[in-house]
Amino acid sequence: MKPMGPIPPEFAGDERLTIGGRDFSHWLDLAGDTPVFVYDMSVVEARIARLLNALPGRVGVHYAIKANPFPPLVQAIAPLVGGLDVASAGEMDLALKRKQPGAISFAGPGKRDAELEAAITAGVTINLESEGEADRALAIGERLGVTPRLAVRVNPDFDLRGSGMKMGGRASPFGVDAEHVPALVQRLCEAGADWRGFHIFAGSQALDSDAIAETQAATVALAARLAEAAGRTPPLVNLGGGFGIPYFPGDTPIDVERIGAALGERLDAAPDILRTSEFAIELGRWLVGESGVYLTRIVDRKESRGEVFLVVDGGLHHQLAASGNFGTVVRRNYPAAIAAKMAEEAQETVSVVGCLCTPLDRLADRVALPRADVGDVAAIFLAGAYGLTASPTVFLGHPKPAELLANSGQT
């Protein structure tokens, strides 16, 4: 038997799984069938409110759409946050329907000229990933007769200690190496661009609150050094994110109140060149990850050489991360349950496997669950971030699952 991570408290404790105050069967009826993702907006609202209450007043919150671009979810989040961060023209179009252009930033390497042109025309801030991208953006702005809004994404000379995915402290396709940033900022301003500041992202999925606070302090210090070297105050410093959520056994939640207090102290002591700068934290996973549940029905129960397999109608083509094939070095189990038997004791060790023709399609590996049979519904938790759109949905041509938003009109 292998352990599972903790079920988010919003979904634990009842005899049957409830989402958004309704029995899971309600959402299956609404979707028409399984598989289905259900996101509880009340969980997201609580996360945003808690974070805003913990952060200093001059620090805003941005939502990184890549974590979950489900349009009704983005629609509900947009008025609650100060900005939306996008990483493609498609995400930018989605954001522009829900937020003013000045509150949207566009990051990511390899932006096409057409994407740069669309962002400049709309008035979206482009987070430049290289000097070459800066050259193209300036040329496009001049051709259009439009002043481009340009920030510089910085490849910092440090990373986020303990992060699941390190984004700094090494050679990287992301951002401009810190030592080259001041000269680029000066060139952008001399060319007449509307320089919007810095985007500094050192890592993601960290569960060490002290490490996050240390990285934020280092980020503020780096922003000050770069600003002083460039001789200009950044209008905005995007401090990145990195806040993790507890997916696996032994994981514990971060302490956002402690992180916010430490950041407040650091900003109070920041150099004068940052006194008028605004700051933002860019988060996706921490805001939405724990809000989602993936429901998938058992279509077969089989035994093979002493092991029990619950074969479901979903799989890694919807939930790649839960299968352990999305950036995880060691395969560990997300929390899972039998939706109608939440309070029952575990009776057997089983593997929950998907419907794809690959041994990689395993949503839960040798976990302890109550007895389940054909027709029962398995629930995979922590499905609110990097789920459907981070998975190979067209692999083998299976249908796309439904998505529903609880506590925001879809009842």
Image (cartoon, rainbow, N blue to C red):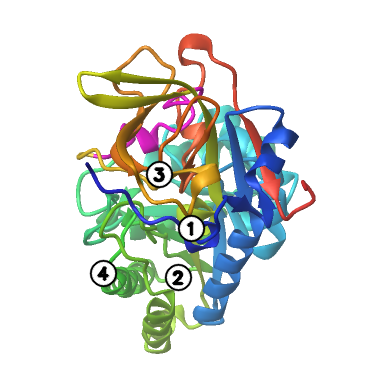
Q: Nearer the viewer, residue 67 or 281?
A: 67
Q: Tell me which label, 1 or 4, sits earlier in the chain.
A: 4
Q: Nearer the viewer, residue 374 or 400?
A: 374
Labelled pair 3, 4 in contact (Cβ < 8 Å): no
> What is the magenta segment's predominant secondary structure?
loop
Q: Please indicate whether residue 175 sits to the left or right of residue 17 in the image.
A: left
Callout 2: 10 Å neighbours few (<14), some, many (20+)?
A: some
Q: Which residue is mark 3?
A: 129
Q: Tell me which label, 2 or 4, sits earlier in the chain.
A: 4
Q: Is residue 134 magenta?
A: no
Q: Secondary structure at mark 2?
A: loop
Identity, as a three-letter code, of the amino acid under mark 1: Leu
Question: Mark 2 or mark 3: which is in front?
Answer: 3
Q: Which residue is mark 1?
A: 283
Question: Mark 1 or mark 3: which is in front?
Answer: 1
Q: Which residue is mark 2?
A: 232
**Separation of residues labelled 1 and 4 (CA atoms):** 16 Å
**Separation of residues labelled 3 and 4 (CA atoms):** 25 Å
Question: Mark 2 or mark 4: which is in front?
Answer: 4
Question: In the rendering, at what x and y percent does residue 176 appear?
Answer: 33, 49
Identity, as a three-letter code, of the amino acid under mark 2: Arg
Residue range highlighted in magenta = 313-328
**Residue sitting at x 19%, y 49%:** 170
